[in-house]
Image (cartoon, rainbow, N blue to C red):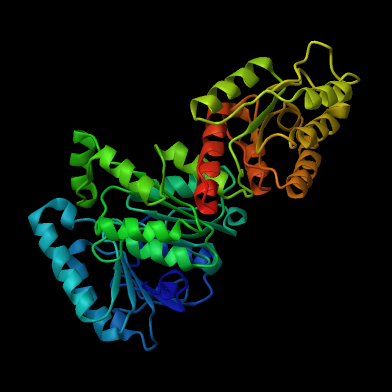
Amino acid sequence: MVNLDLLFKPRSLAVIGISKDPGRGGGFIWWKIRAQGFPGKKYPVSRSCSDLEGIPCYPSLTDIGEPVDLVIAAIPAAGVEKLLAECARKGVKFVVIHAAGFAELGEEGKGLQERVLKIARQNNMRLVGPNCMGIFCPEARLNTIVEIEESDARPGGVAFSGQSGWATEHFVVGGNARGLRFSKVISSGNQADLNFIDFLAYFGSDPSTKVICAYTEGLTRGREVLNLAFQVSKTKPVIVWKSGFSPAGTRAALSHSGSVTGNREVWLGAARSAGIITAEGFEDLVDLAVAFSSPPYPKGQKVGIMAEAGGGGIAAADACEKLGLEVRPFSPGLRGRLTAFLKDYLPPFSGTSNPLDLVWLPRETALTICTRSIEMMAEEVDSVIMMSYMPFAVPEILPSFIEALAQLRERLHLPIYLVPPYAAVAGEAMKILTLACLPAFPSFERAARAVSATSSWQANKDGYTV
């Protein structure tokens, strides 16, 4: 394993290619690093300006009189080879190369990439990129990837390695909107040096990381990746979205990051054997990260469904059984207890089998009905998928719902998955619920997928077959 501590949490860094324009490459990165309050030493390097708001700029990296752990190169590809020679003389440990114009452009670019890599290897220096967006590490208050609100940049347990800058930005922004919080995020680009296997090994041993996610176009050292994933996935979920299987996707991957992709069926079989959870696109990747960020996980495949809509219950049951989950009818004894409890709250036409049809909950007793019903259902199910109008349609009720359901989840060790009645207007509530380890999903189908994935991973971890 490569120790990447000084990449994600450097004691000092230099940004090469500073300009006074905060909308351009080096200027954008420099202002972001300053604004986020990175606590380490930071050095702007620029040929075009002598100072930035009173902070002196250095004409070259070698003019800095102190050690530099990390260099962030925001200069054109043509200048990177010379810069790497300076980094070698300076004893720099890590360099992030943002520029495009390397192996993804054909033979000439491939030659430049190989020369740059040769300099790095000869001088015990590690590279991220080229053709990448860099780093996001909330713990270090370091973010060169995409702007998010300071309140959303709190450290969490999700790590991400993305071969695409867009996929990485999208995962940070889209995941944040769903309630994900991150430990470490890396945009790796062409992966000339450090690649997915290095990040997987590091994340696997990183105590801050609980869930590992990735977007990849091509896998180098594929057998080693699979062997490593097999070991890491015994203790941490490894979720991978791999693209580039279609002819058009393969061509695009080659010109985008210089990656050679592969056969979809071979990948799916190999990933399954290695314990990798495969994501089918961006939304599935985020859903899976939300699900695995919200323990406990189901210890079996028996699902209880509770919905304030008969049609919703039917849709949930269909979605679960399509994925091989069990939606068993409740036992006569449980149905009798549910009927006895609900008769004073709900009309007599509500269904007390599985799914449990709660029709339309009275506002003043909604929380009592939901929590008591789940408590009884927990006797016969391993997880609950729940849809209620109240926490989504009446915002002032949401905090009390979260408190009650969180206490119930902890006491019963029962995973509870929430689905809003109208996902289009429930974004903020879904985020708040997920942050409280009550994972929320836009549809019953996506909630069922989350139950299926988490229960299968738990079964593999515990050594039993589902």
- In this view, which residue lies farthest toward the left? 107
Q: Looking at the image, which residue is at 79% across and 37% down?
A: 375
In the picture, measured across the screen, residue 345 lies left or right of residue 440, that is right
Q: Looking at the image, which residue is at 78% across and 38% down?
A: 401
Tell me the quarter of the image containing the N terminus.
Answer: bottom left
Is 79 placed above or below 368 here? Answer: below
Exactly how many numbered labels are in the figure?
0
Is 358 placed above or below 117 here? Answer: above
Is 346 placed above or below 59 here? Answer: above
- In this view, which residue lies farthest toward the top? 349
- In this view, which residue lies farthest toward the bottom? 65
Nearest the viewer among 361 and 456 is 456
User: How far from the left and from the top, in percent, is residue 252?
Assistant: 21, 41
In the picture, measured across the screen, residue 299 lies left or right of residue 142, that is right
Task: Judge whether residue 366 can be spotted in this image.
Answer: yes
Q: Looking at the image, which residue is at 57% across and 33% down?
A: 447
Task: Judge whether residue 20 can be spotted in this image.
Answer: no
Nearest the viewer among 407 and 355 is 355
User: How far from the left and from the top, in percent, is residue 189?
Assistant: 29, 56
User: How far from the left and from the top, in percent, is residue 133?
Assistant: 36, 57
Nearest the viewer among 183 and 210 is 210
In the picture, measured across the screen, residue 332 lies left or right of residue 420, that is right
User: How far from the left and from the top, in percent, is residue 84?
Assistant: 23, 75
